[in-house]
Image: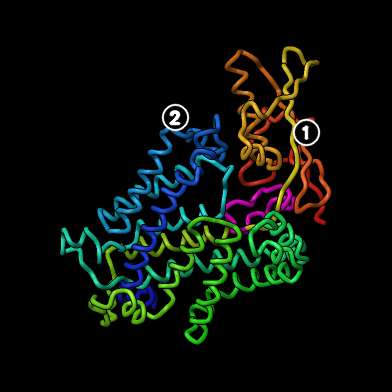
Amino acid sequence: MINRWLFTQIDNSALIIFRVFFGFLIAAESFGAILTGWVRRTLVEPQFTFNFIGFEFLQPLPGNGMYFYFALMGIFGIFVMIGFKYRWSMIAYTILWAGVYYMQKSSYNNHYYLLLLLCMLMSTLPAGNYFSIDVKRNPVLKKISMPRWCVLFIIIQLWIVYTYASVAKLYPDWLDYTVARNLMLSRADYPIVGSILQKHWTHVSITYFGILFDLLIIPLLLWKRTRLAAFCISIFFHLFNSFVFQIGIFPYLSLAFSVFFFSKERIHKIFMPKKEFYIDNEIIVPSYRNLLIPALSIWFLIQLALPVRHWFIPGDVLWTEEGHKLSWRMMLRGRSGHTNFYIEFKDNMCKRVQIDKNQYLTKKQRRIVNTKPDAIWQFAQFLKKEHEKKGMNIAVYASSRVSVNGKKSRVLIDPDVDLTSVDWNYFTTNPWVIKYDKE
C-alpha cells in the first residue's frame, strides 16, 4: 500500500512547469527586494539586525554587500527557472534565503517561512529532469515521470498551512470583525476601493471568507467537481491579497500550486503539449525508500507540532508572542505601544539613564522593539555589549505598555527585571513577560 501511494510513477509535467514558475518568482523576489528598497531598509541601513535568537552570528554584509547577496540569489533563481545546474542552484538559493530569514525579524512574515520550507522541498525533488538546460547538455537526465510522493508532499504541506491558518482565526477579535476593521483602516486612502474597504459588510466578508477559504480550499481543489470553481475563487482571493496587502510573490506562488491539483492530462495539454505523456503508472521502489519514509514522517510530525506548541506555554500567545512564529498565525493581530529602555551603571546603582532608541534603531526596528518581547530582550543584550566595549558594566530595564488589536494598553515587561541577567526561553515561558487572563 505505501509503495503504491508513494512510488507509483506519474507524469511529471506539473512539477516541471512549477519549477519554471517557482524559479521566476524567487528571482523576482530577490531582484524586487533590491529595487523596492527592502534590502536597503531592512539590511543596509540598520546598525545591526534582530535575528532569530541563537543566530547572532548572522549579520548583514558590510557596505553594499547585501545588494550583491540578493543579486546572487536572483541569479540562482533564474538558474532554477531554466534548469541550469538545477540541484546545486536550488540548494544555493535555499542556503542564501535561510541566511536572510534567520538574519532579521523586523520584516518577519509567515510567507518567508513558507518559502524556506518550499526551497528545502524543491531541493530534493527531480524538477530539473525535463525542459531544462541540464537535460539539453546531458540527455541521460531526461525523464517524463516522477514518483507520486513528490506531489503528495506538496499537497500535504499546503493542507497543513491552510488548515492551521483557518483554525488560528477562530478567536474573538477575529470573529467580531475587529482584526478585519483594523487591517482596513490603514488602507482607507487606496484609490477607488479605499472607502469600500471601510464598510462593515467588507469586514464581515473578509472575516468569514478568510476562515472558510483557508479551511476548504485544499479539499475543494482536490475534488474534481469543485476544482474549477475553487481555482477561480483562489484567483480572486490571492489577487485581492496582492493588491490590498502587497505581500510580494506569495499570492502568485499560491496560484502556481494549482498545477498540482488539476489532472495530469490537463496540465500536460495546456503547458507541455509537445512532451510525451507518461501513462504506464509503474511502481518503482527506489533505493532511498527506507530513508525517505522516516524523513517524511519526521518532517510532517514537526509541521503538525510547531503550530500547537503555544498551547503548552502559559499565557495568551496573542499577548506574549511565545509560540507565535512558525505557526501559520497570519495577519491575526495588530500590536502598538511604546517601550523605554533605562540603563543602570552597576558601579553606581543610583544612576539610571534613559536610552535614546533613535541612536541605534531604524523606524522599522523601533516598531518591533516597542511591542515584542523577544526584540525587547535582544535590544537589552545589544545595549549591554555596546557599553561593555566602553568598559561599562550595566543593567538594562524596560518600561513597556502595549495594546493588541486596539484594546487598552497594558504593561508587557516587568520593569524591575534586569533584562541582561535573564535568558531567553525557547520552549517555555519567560517569567518577566507579564501575563494576563484572556479577555
- Residue 283 on image: x %, y %: 29, 77
Mark 2 element type: loop
- Mark 1 closeness class: few <14, some 14–19, many ≥20 residues within 10 Å: some
Mark 1 element type: strand
Is residue 266 found left or right of 210 in the rendered image? left
Is residue 285 found left or right of 247 in the rendered image? left
- Residue 231 on image: x %, y %: 50, 76
User: Mark 1 sits on what residue?
Assistant: 399
Question: Is 184 rendered above or below residue 95?
Answer: below
Q: 115 and 385: which one is in front?
A: 115
At label 1, the amino acid type is Ser
- Residue 352 on image: x %, y %: 77, 20
Is residue 310 found left or right of 409 in the rendered image? left
Q: 126 and 246: which one is in front?
A: 246
Question: Which quadrant would residue 377 be assigned to in this image?
Answer: top right
- Please name which of the two marks, 2 or 1, marks the residue nearer to the observer: 2
Q: Which residues are magenta?
A: 306-330
